[in-house]
Amino acid sequence: MTDFRSAAIGVFDSGVGGLTVANAILDLMPAEAIHYVGDTAHLPYGPKPVEEIRHYSEVIVGYLLDQGCKLIVVACNTATAAALEHLRQRWPEVPIVGMEPAVKPATAATRSGVIGVLATRGTITSSRYAALASRYAQDIRMLQDPCMGLVEHIEAGRLHDSETAALLQKVLAPMQAAGADTYVLGCTHYPLVIPLLRELLGDTVTLINPAPAVARQVNRLLSERDLLATTPPERPLLIQATGSLDSFRLLVPQIFHQAVILESLDLGDR
């Protein structure tokens, strides 16, 4: 009988951004296997209608569960806002972990009372984000920006070029002028430009990357269910993309040091 503890954790995002979450999971739980799907055929999710994102998410989760995954991570803030509750209702027996902008830790970290939130339009306009802001940030000034074009720059591997810097500087300037001292990275792509953000913002501000907190939640859920892997995975990290593999070829070697299988994924007419 197969030990389900050795099954993979399924992780998905619209592109390479969720790799920052997969990396945090492997840092905390190096014995775990990861099966990652990047939906590059439909990138970016941010501007798309909720129903469309929900459909893509349901198809991918169904595929990952068919592959035997023991837990699912929706490693995308936009997909979490659009689809997480729907996915949990569809598969109530499956532990499904989502992302959310780290508003609560940001309010605890700020000294100036001003927070900058870098997130996609789909996240910023979601009821999930509004509820977090209402609950934790009533006495905090929150400045949001959808960072239009940033995901595409990151997917192109342009993590440190002048155009990416100019885009970020335009986003950050009004936040800096307002006195923001804490910045929430509300998209899983954005931790990939932390070095550039540090150059633009300096070392005194706080940058909040939610990926380590998500990894801790995955660890907790697996532990509660006695599903933590007990031996190193037999297979390398598996990464599949529904469209172009170019961004993965550029960025995977910069993120992971273990063996990786990178391949195309055809989910058919969905």
Image (cartoon, helix red, strand yellow):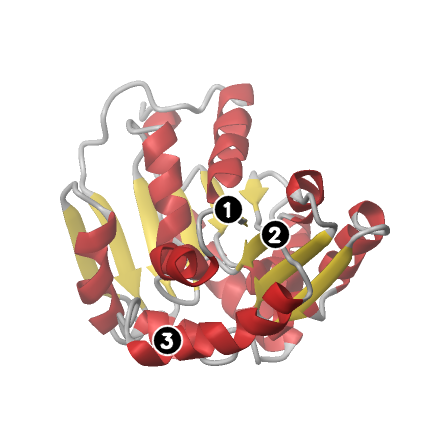
Say which quarter of the image contains residue 190: bottom left
Task: Look at the numbered disc 3 and give the secondary structure of its residue.
Answer: helix
Cβ–Cβ under 8 Å for marks 2 and 1: yes
The quadrant of the picture occupied by the N terminus is: top left
Work out how far the residue at label 2 is from the one at label 1, CA to CA, in angstroms.
8 Å
Residue 164 has which mark?
Answer: 3
Name the secondary structure under disc 1.
loop
**Closer to us: 208 or 48:** 208
Amino acid type shown at disc 1? Thr
Where in the figure is residue 139, as x and y percent of width and height? 85, 50
Classify residue 201 as left or right of residue 120: left
Residue 150 horizontal side relative to residue 252, left or right? right
> Whole-percent x and y of residue 143?
69, 65
Q: Which mark is residue 181?
A: 2
Residue 130 percent across, percent down from the top left: 78, 60
Disc 2 secondary structure class? loop
Mark 3 neighbour density, 10 Å: few (under 14) some (14–19) many (20 or more)? some
The residue tagged 1 is 204
Question: What amino acid is found at the position of numbered circle 2 in the picture?
Answer: Asp
Separation of residues labelled 1 and 3 (CA atoms)? 22 Å
Quick one: label 1, few (<14), some, or many (20+) residues within 10 Å? few
Mark 3 and mark 2: Cα distance apart in space = 21 Å
Q: Residue at x 74, y 50 (%)?
A: 113
Q: Position of residue 93 (x, y in %)?
A: 60, 38
Q: Residue at x 57, y 70 (%)?
A: 120
